[in-house]
Amino acid sequence: MGGMNGETLMRRILDHGSRADPYPLYTELRRTPVCRQEDGSYAVSTYHELLALLHDPRLTSTHAEREAADGGQLPPSFLGMDPPEHDRVRSLAMRQFGPPHSPSRIQDMRGELESTVRKLIDAFPEGGEVDLVDAFAYPFPVTVICRLLGVPHEDEPRFRTWADKLVASIDPRPGEDPAIRLREGAETRRELALYLNDLVEKGAHGSGDGAGDGSGDGSGDGMLFRLADDHDAEGGPLSRLELLVTAVLLLIAGHETTVNLITNGMLTLLRRPEQWERLRREPEIAPRLVEELLRFEPPVQIIPQRGALADIEIGDVTIPEGSVVALVLASGNRDPKRFTDPDTFDPDRPDIEHLGFGSGIHSCFGAPLARLEAQIALTELVRRLDNARLLQDPPPYRSSAVLRGPRHLTIGFDRVL
Ligand code: HEM
């Protein structure tokens, strides 16, 4: 591929035909760490340059949701804000989520996560085939976000319909009109926000804190209600609109990413029986294994749209003010200047580290939850599926190059243990 320039490369990376294995293209792309594209945007692909830019206040995130906000009636979430607004909303939300501001709500969810995983696996067909995406990885995080927010069990099917539509709205389909898809996405976000608004209204007049008494349907409990009531916090509480937009963000940011981490994880393990066996024998390696997965097959491959607020000199390039910048995180994770044998999946790396959750002020808010979900899911699947094998390799992928993962992952197994 010697002669191929960076522009052509980015086009090939975005092409659906490259989805199963974009990594050789990233290797080529890293020859030009900061590469100008034909439309005037820039693609950054090497670890140290990515890290520097993720921490650079001259790169704004207010572009990130422009597309989503257009036509929608909801303002941007904190993912699409810069400081100081970003920091205010994020830290108010963070107070409800775990350390350092409160006891870890996430570790408290462990039992709930384990029982959700157990039920999903119990429902697999006896001896045969299962699509791990539809039967497991896809429903799991929706249930978890419902519990986290405090959505009552009986409303989960409705919530799931919205989640389906949201995933569809961020995954381009060949031959369709993107404007229609984006409008549908905006409409879904609005419906979801209206539903959550109703729930907060009811919760506010409802049973109060139903936690622990076992009688509750969840109403009055959950992050949604705690956030609405957080009058003690500096800068708080969130306005109702901020609250709703944040709740919708948690669903959007935490759903398909988690689906892809779990399915990428199963694919990686099924391709490496020795790693599968090892996790079965030593479940305590799950945290290291999940970190290495976030490096090796990160669900968020690219942060597609940061904006330069000033001229930014990086390496021997100046990114001019006003440029759009794509941060190719997945390429940074395979940069041989940072990682020894970057293309080898090795949970025993002495220095596991990655850009899979981004870095800097926007680094993943849900990381502790995502980690725990993936650790529990992979450990249980490996423990319970007897003689599992891939029935299609590579599997079919969703269209998105940004949130990359299999659309189906069909496996065969002898029985559920
Ligand atoms: C931000 C990855 C799961 C909530 C991010 C970013 C990445 C990421 C790369 C940075 C985006 C940027 O800089 O523009 C992932 C991956 C996940 C995951 C790989 C699963 C494997 C979750 C979950 C939640 C969540 C479960 C919520 C429950 C968020 C939020 C932000 C974010 C709210 C925005 C943070 C900010 O702007 O300050 N995530 N995420 N994520 N993530 Fe995650």
Image (cartoon, rainbow, N blue to C red):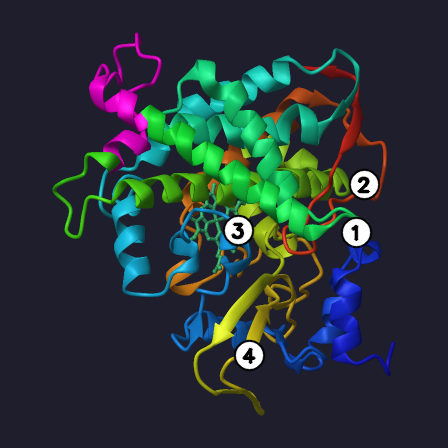
Q: Is residue 224 left or right of residue 317?
A: left
- Badges 1 and 2: C-beta atoms under 8 Å apart? yes
**Looking at the image, is mark 2 or mark 3 earlier in the sequence?**
3
The amino acid type, in three-letter code, at marker 1 is Ala
Q: What amino acid is at disc 3?
A: Gly
Q: Are marks 4 and 3 in contact (CB under 8 Å)?
A: no
Q: Which residues are magenta?
A: 200-227
Q: Which residue is mark 4?
A: 323
Look at the numbered disc 1 and give the secondary structure of its residue.
loop
Q: Pick the quarter of the image with the C terminus.
A: top right
The kind of residue on which mark 2 rests is Pro
Name the residue that disc number 2 marks. Answer: 395
Q: Residue 71: which numbered mark, if any?
A: 3
Q: Is residue 260 visible?
A: no
Quadrant in the picture for residue 140:
top right
Give the percent coordinates (x, y) of residue 284.
50, 36
